[in-house]
Image (tube, rainbow, N blue to C red):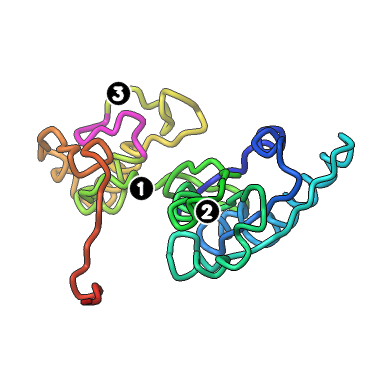
Amino acid sequence: MIVADRKSIHEILDMVKDCSNILVVGCKGCVTVCNVGGLKEVQILAATLKIARKKEGRPLQVDEALLERQCDPEYIAMIQDRVNDYEAVISMACGVGPQFLSEAYPNQRFYPAVNTTFFGGAVAHGIWEERCAGCGTCIIHHFDGLCPIARCSKSLMNGPCGGSDHGKCEIAKTVDCIWDKIVRKKMEQGRLNDLLQVFPAKNWQTARDGGPRRSRREELIQNG
């Protein structure tokens, strides 16, 4: 899933400092799973904004909405009857959400309430870690399901680099060295010779470096 963190309340307040009424829109997608932009977080943000502005002596009307997903036009359309009733809209989705909203409602102002960080998963309650870099050319089958692109600090396809210390990356003792895990797993399975294969330089054109990407599924595209 896409993992995100909520922006500071001060940053969000600054975005809407000139507004007297706003709409906060949550998303039931990834940001709900990582406890950032679901119903509970929408309610907390709305209450916090109202309290903060009341303390300033400038009351702020804040209404709430929750969409199934903000990355799908059919759900974006569910707020079309009310979206322009406000001076601004705060999106609590990942960075995709406010962009879809902005394109659907060009006369409205949209602000992001969260910082989108990475593709990852929960490794413990309240802790998420990066697992995928979205590079567009998955090679984890060569490394027993472990990704050196996303999880190696240097994105090395031919590792390890020599900076590992007791299974931890040289950049921080809290970061696991993925190459340490890869080598250990190969050894446990008696397939260490797999790592004698030398991979050529990665073609980053399939990653974000190649420009904005598009996925097209012909069988799902409706004619007309």
Q: Which mark is residue 58?
A: none
74 displayed left or right of 157: right
Identified by mark 1, the residue type is Cys
In the picture shown, does residue 117 fall above or below 190?
Answer: above
196 displayed left or right of 116: left
Q: CA distance from mark 1 to mark 2?
A: 13 Å
Tag 1's secondary structure? strand
Tag 2's secondary structure? strand
Residue corresponding to mark 3: 162
In the picture shown, does residue 47 fall above or below 184?
Answer: below
Tag 3's secondary structure? loop
Q: Nearer the viewer, residue 181 or 74?
A: 74
Residue corresponding to mark 1: 132
Percent of width and height locating residue 32: 58, 59
Q: Residue at x 67, y 36 (%)?
A: 8
Range of residues picked out in magenta: 151-160
Residue corresponding to mark 2: 122
Identified by mark 3, the residue type is Gly
